[in-house]
């Protein structure tokens, strides 16, 4: 029982940081106050639906789920696109885009086995590298301890093109 509890706790801690960070980045790009009610709501919804997705993956529901202890959560892959949507059209447009993308991903999940060979490791590696390079300024600001101060003093927080 001891190793299971320790591994479960490790899973929860890893899941927590990876789910909270994208919500904080998107909330900052939307202009929400750091620690404000809107940011807290985004974080709560990310955690709630990550938990629901984890249960679907672990317990399974019909043909959905691996029935293995797999943690599901938000992805950094969509953060750059979400930042541009929220800056140009607002948070409501972002929520609509997320719904449309969810339907698209569900349809893609039905055929991914047949098109998997179109995505060799070189292609997927380059996509992951591009995401990491785009988010590098965010990591530098957080590592330097100036992210909260930078957001409060700069209304264009989240504009990493400078």
Image: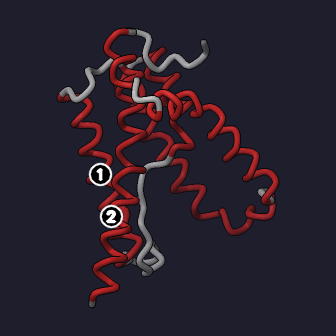
Q: How is the image coloured?
A: secondary structure
Indicate which disc residue 12 carries: 2
Residue lying at 76% horizontally and 46% vertically, measured from the top left: 126
Quadrant placement of the C terminus: top right
Q: Earlier in the sequence, mark 1 or mark 2?
A: 2
Q: Position of residue 66 (x, y in %)?
A: 48, 77
Which residue in the rendered view is the most extreme toward the left? Answer: 37
Residue 14 figure quarter: bottom left
Q: Nearer the viewer, mark 1 or mark 2?
A: 2
SS class of the residue under badge 1?
helix
Screen quadrant of the N terminus: bottom left
Give the image location of residue 101, x and y in percent.
50, 42
Residue 121 image label: none
Left/right placement of residue 80 relative to residue 87 reads right
Residue 63, given in percent of the width and then of the height, sits at 46, 76
Residue for point 51% across, 35% down: 139
The quarter holding residue 154 reads top left
C-beta proximity under 8 Å, tags 1 and 2: no
Left or right of 117 in this view: 159: left
Circle 2 sits in a helix, a strand or a loop, which is it? helix
Residue labelled with disc 1: 47
On screen, residue 100 above or below 149: below
In the rendered view, does 138 fall on the left or right side of 58?
Answer: right
Q: Is residue 67 left or right of residue 117?
A: left
């Amino acid at each position: 029982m001891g190793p299971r509890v320790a591994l479960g706790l490790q899973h929860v801690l890893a899941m927590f940081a990876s789910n909270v960070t994208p919500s904080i980045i998107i909330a900052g790009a939307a202009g929400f106050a750091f620690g404000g009610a809107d940011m807290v709501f985004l974080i709560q919804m990310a955690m709630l639906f990550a938990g629901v997705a984890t249960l679907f993956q672990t317990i399974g529901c019909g043909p959905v789920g691996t029935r293995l202890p797999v943690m599901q959560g938000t992805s950094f892959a969509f953060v750059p696109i979400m930042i541009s949507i929220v800056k140009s059209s607002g948070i409501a447009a972002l929520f609509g885009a997320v719904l449309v993308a969810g339907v698209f991903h569900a349809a893609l999940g039905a055929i991914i086995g047949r098109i998997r060979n179109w995505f060799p490791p070189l292609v997927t590696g380059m996509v992951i590298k591009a995401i990491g390079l785009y988010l590098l300024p965010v990591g530098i600001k957080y590592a330097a301890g100036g992210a909260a101060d930078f957001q409060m003093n700069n209304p264009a927080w989240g504009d990493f093109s400078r």
